[in-house]
Amino acid sequence: MLSGKTALITGAARGIGKAIALKLAGEGADIAFTDLALSDATAQLEKELQSNGVKAKGYASNAANFEDTQKVVGEIVAEFGRIDILVNNAGITKDGALKRMTEDQWDAVIAVNLKSVFNFTKAVQPVMWKQAGGSIINMSSVVGVSGNSNQANYSASKAGIIGFTKSVAQEFGIRGIRSNAIAPGFIETEMTAALPDEIRKAWIEQIPLRRGGTPDDVAGAVLFLASDLSSYVSGQVIQVCGAMNC
């Protein structure tokens, strides 16, 4: 489905980002991916991706830094020649009650989660504009749609991504560039696995499908938006949440 295309995925060394990289590589896309620093995990992912017969390379990048983002996108274009798919997946959490939330906690989450989406979209825009096509996929969250107690910074950053996504869809559509967001719900990752069993059980009982999602569930939605199956889908938010947030 993605043969001949190049995907750039941010924050892809583990979890949902890694599942997305593997899914897109399995459909023939060459993969450039970023993480804050290169590590054994990024080297291992390179090998896993290359086993699909595609070109793959990891890059160290601070997604929250504008100049660093411009630099790494330039390196990727020089190496791969094009960028057809951008998946803005990099993100962090610094949860807490608003009355105790510090300015640093607020600024860090907004910078990594929201500013990084601006940084990478801004950097790939000239490339996609010249190609007259591309798919931008931004990772939001169900809490960006509905809000959540003790996550004012995270919810604000993910809600901002939705507004940004819709604006870019309207602005870039004239050049055949699509922009969509995915809003995952309760996804089974290393982070959620560390939660106490009673908290995980309480979450799952709120989900009509009665299970947590998997990173591969999210990756499947990304594949749809990255491929020509969604060639007339732009400016949308797909909630991957098991009907938790209908």
Image (cartoon, rainbow, N blue to C red):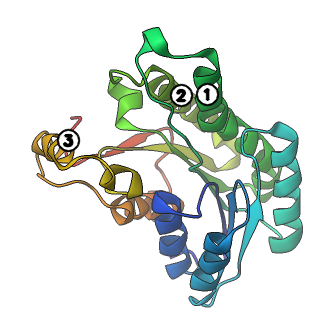
Tell me what residue is drawn at x 73 percent, y 59 percent.
37
Question: The disc labelled 3 sits on which kind of residue?
Answer: Ile
Q: Is residue 246 above or below residue 1?
A: above
Q: Is residue 134 above or below residue 27?
A: above
Disc number for residue 157: 2
**Secondary structure state at the residue bearing disc 3:** helix
Tell me what residue is drawn at x 84 percent, y 64 percent.
77
Query: Can you give x and y, in whole percent of width and height, for residue 119 in the image?
Result: 75, 39
The crowding category of the residue bearing disc 2, from other C-alpha atoms within 10 Å (few below 14, some 14 to 19, many at least 20), is many
Disc number for residue 135: none
In the foreground, 164 or 65:
65
Tag in front: 1 or 3: 3
**To which residue does mark 1 refer?**
110
Lower position in the chain sequence, tag 1 or tag 3: 1
Q: Give the left or right position of residue 197, taking residue 53 as reference.
A: left
**To which residue does mark 3 refer?**
199
- Farthest residue, direction top: 99
Query: Can you give x and y, in whole percent of width and height, for residue 227 in the image?
Result: 51, 65
**Secondary structure state at the residue bearing disc 2:** helix
Lower position in the chain sequence, tag 2 or tag 3: 2
The crowding category of the residue bearing disc 3, from other C-alpha atoms within 10 Å (few below 14, some 14 to 19, many at least 20), is few
Q: Measure the C-alpha gap from mark 2 to mark 3.
A: 24 Å
- Answer whether residue 27 is visible to the viewer in this image: no
The crowding category of the residue bearing disc 1, from other C-alpha atoms within 10 Å (few below 14, some 14 to 19, many at least 20), is many
Q: Is residue 216 above or below residue 235?
A: below
Tell me what residue is drawn at x 15 percent, y 44 percent.
198
In the foreground, 207 or 13:
13
Query: Can you give x and y, in whole percent of width and height, for residue 55 in the image?
Result: 70, 82
Q: Measure the C-alpha gap from mark 1 to mark 3.
A: 26 Å
Q: Is residue 156 above or below residue 213?
A: above
